[in-house]
């Protein structure tokens, strides 16, 4: 089964945000999906989803697990009792926001998969987690797949910022990432990333969240810049409990002026001493520039 719809927000006369959404069952269990995302009438994302969620317990005391977020394990909430996809408006820090989320129960885990669309163009991608499947400290490794189509599907490029990089033509700290590549976070150099349309100069930053942590041996990278191929969109079938299976997608293809897909991973710590009742969150911010 599935649930799907179309959103224009805040109104049909003021189309600040417009997108489709869906929440499906296996084999297409990739969490909440937003597609054909437009801000102020301009396309920025062909599709964004959370196709892989892997759980690693200290000392391999349990698992590892792969927990697909699907329609079947989603539940209505008191905020939206009649739907498994909850859509609501609110104000935070003076900004008008639109939340789109699904709440899931998998064993003892309670999980909320949320996108927040802010009136200044930001998209906040978040996973919230509570509950202990085993009384052992663990990490939820969440993988967002962000298929950028800024302005259109072609002519995009990927960039990385570090404090130690000079101005080599893209502004202080920025350099182009080409060909396909995977990277890890580096808080010391304020490392962040961006995807930009080379024609218009419009783009979006991909900023690590405060709780996103850094890759480890189990989940060995934090971001992947890949050239789009339709057969590489595996939906909920991407990877397994023991392997994210993203490595084989890296084959050195040219990214300059291409259709770019970004995979981003956050590593959400859940300490056993918390007892399973506290909620933890992680995920990147997508922030517009030159829009």
Image (cartoon, rainbow, N blue to C red):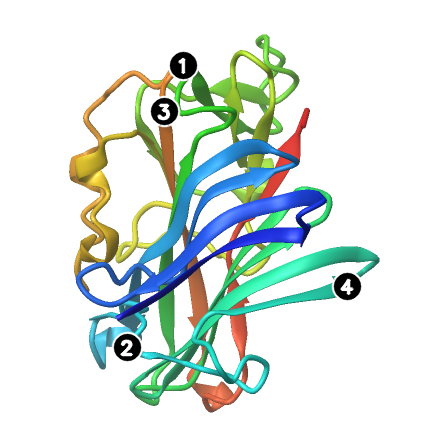
Q: Position of residue 64 (x, y in %)?
A: 21, 71
Q: CA distance from mark 3 to mark 2?
A: 32 Å
Residue at which label 3 appears: 259
Question: CA–CA distance between discs 1 and 4?
Answer: 37 Å
Observer-side mark, 1 or 4, equals: 4
- What residue is shown with label 1? 257
Alpha carbons under labels 3 and 1: distance apart: 7 Å
- Label 3–label 4 contact, CB within 8 A: no
The answer to which image quadrant residue 36 occupies is top left
Q: Are marks 3 and 1 in contact (CB under 8 Å)?
A: no
* Quarter containing the N terminus: bottom left
- Mark 3 to mark 4 CA distance (whole Å): 34 Å
- For residue 69, side relative to residue 99 (left or right): left
In space, the residues marked 4 and 2 are separated at their CA atoms by: 31 Å
Q: How many marks?
A: 4
Judge by depth and name the residue closer to the eye, 29 or 205.
29
* Sequence-first disc among 3 and 4: 4
Report the residue at 18% width, 48% height from top.
Answer: 245
């Amino acid at each position: 089964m599935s649930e799907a719809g179309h959103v224009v927000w805040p109104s049909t006369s003021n189309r600040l945000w417009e997108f489709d959404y869906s929440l499906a069952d296996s084999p297409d269990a990739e969490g909440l999906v937003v597609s054909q995302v437009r801000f102020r009438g301009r396309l920025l994302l062909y599709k964004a989803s959370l196709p892989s969620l892997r759980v690693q317990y200290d000392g391999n005391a349990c698992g590892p697990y792969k927990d697909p977020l699907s329609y079947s394990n989603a539940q209505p909430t008191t905020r939206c009792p009649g739907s498994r996809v909850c859509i609501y408006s609110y104000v935070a820090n003076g900004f008008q926001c639109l939340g789109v989320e699904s709440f899931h129960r998998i064993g003892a885990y309670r999980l909320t998969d949320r996108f927040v669309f802010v009136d200044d163009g930001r998209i906040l991608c978040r996973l919230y987690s509570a509950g202990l499947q085993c009384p052992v400290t663990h990490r939820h490794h969440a993988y967002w797949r962000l298929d950028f189509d800024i302005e259109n599907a072609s002519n995009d490029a990927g960039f990385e910022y570090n404090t130690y990089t000079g101005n080599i033509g893209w502004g202080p700290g920025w350099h182009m990432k080409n060909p396909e590549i995977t990277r890890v976070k580096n808080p010391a150099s304020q490392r962040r990333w961006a995807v930009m349309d080379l024609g218009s100069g419009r783009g979006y930053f991909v900023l690590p969240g405060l709780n996103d942590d850094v890759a480890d041996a189990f989940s060995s990278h934090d971001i992947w810049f890949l050239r789009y191929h339709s057969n590489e969109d595996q939906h909920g079938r991407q990877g397994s409990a023991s392997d994210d299976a993203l490595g084989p997608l890296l084959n050195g293809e040219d990214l300059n002026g291409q259709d770019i897909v970004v995979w981003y991973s956050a590593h959400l710590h859940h300490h056993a001493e918390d007892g399973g009742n506290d909620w933890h969150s992680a995920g990147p911010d997508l922030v517009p520039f030159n829009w």
